[in-house]
Image (cartoon, grey):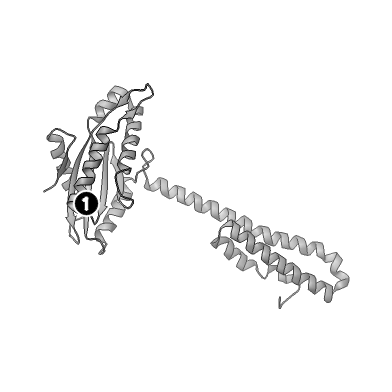
Amino acid sequence: MLFLGPGALLYPLAALIWAALSYPIFIVAIINSIVCLVTYHSLSSFYLSDSSSAYLSTTISVRIGLCMLGFAPLILCIITSNRQLLYQQMLHLANHDSLTNTINRRYFFEKGEKYLSDQKNKSVSLIMLDLDHFKNLNDRYGHYVGDLMLQHFSNVVKENIRTGDLFARIGGEEFMILILNSSIEETQEMAEHIRIATKSTPMQLEQQDLLFITTSIGIAYQTLPTQANLQQLINDADHALYQSKSSGRNQVSVAS
């Protein structure tokens, strides 16, 4: 408004680029509209008052320049939004198991170590789950049905854990749940709910057959802070899981 002339078309460009990189497309469109209207009013006033004879010959150029000024931030905003969306998708694929949509082993260890080192946390519980006789299921029904069962089991577990709990597929039919600031009794209760829900929630096959499966569970519990790392906690839960399997499967055992 203070420094008019043809160069006024480029004055707001830097701010519009910043807005395109910072705000969603709708807000950028509103900002663009306001800037273009104000700039057009200023330039129109300038050419009418100071160089009215050249107004008709330059008005088309001014309007084209304003269109380019308006389109450039919008295109940049769209490109930036698409890049951010692509980045989020790639990050999700890098941190999650593609079959069950649970977090993968690498991300589980990364987040788990951070949880153990956080001074705000008072305790940590680790639940290790293993589907019983899963190899026999694969041999009888095929790996496709086995994959469907893994997805089915993952959904059952997700319905019985809290929002902030880390649920990961470690490999094959083995899963882990990392729980913060929960007592050993609450952890056992959660594990028991998962065991019962798995046993009582069959998966329906395409032939209308119901396929049942059970899970063996091992629990490790540790108060914080501690010198133990996540791998030691996993080893304890693995020993408890072995105890559940050796005692007949479909059980919950707690590491001593």
Above-or-below relation of 239 to 84: above
* Residue drawn 79% across the image and 73% down it: 45
* Residue drawn 35% across the image and 44% down it: 102
Classed neighbour count for the residue bearing mark 1: other residues with Cα under 10 Å, few (<14), some (14–19), many (≥20): many
| Mark 1 residue element | strand
* Residue 234 visible within the image: no
Nearer the observer, 131 or 232: 131
**What is the residue that sits farthest to the bottom in this orientation?**
2
Q: In the figure, is residue 98 to the left or right of 36?
A: left
Q: Which quadrant does the N terminus fall into?
A: bottom right
The x and y percentages for residue 173 are: 27, 36
* Residue drawn 35% across the image and 31% down it: 148
Nearer the observer, 74 or 212: 212
Q: In the figure, is residue 88 to the left or right of 141?
A: right
The x and y percentages for residue 227 are: 17, 59
The residue labelled by disc 1 is 125
Find residue 8 and report its image quarter. bottom right
Find residue 29 and report its image quarter. bottom right
Q: In the figure, is residue 205 to the left or right of 213?
A: right
The x and y percentages for residue 51 are: 85, 74
* Residue drawn 14% across the image and 32% down it: 248
Q: Amino acid at mark 1?
A: Ser
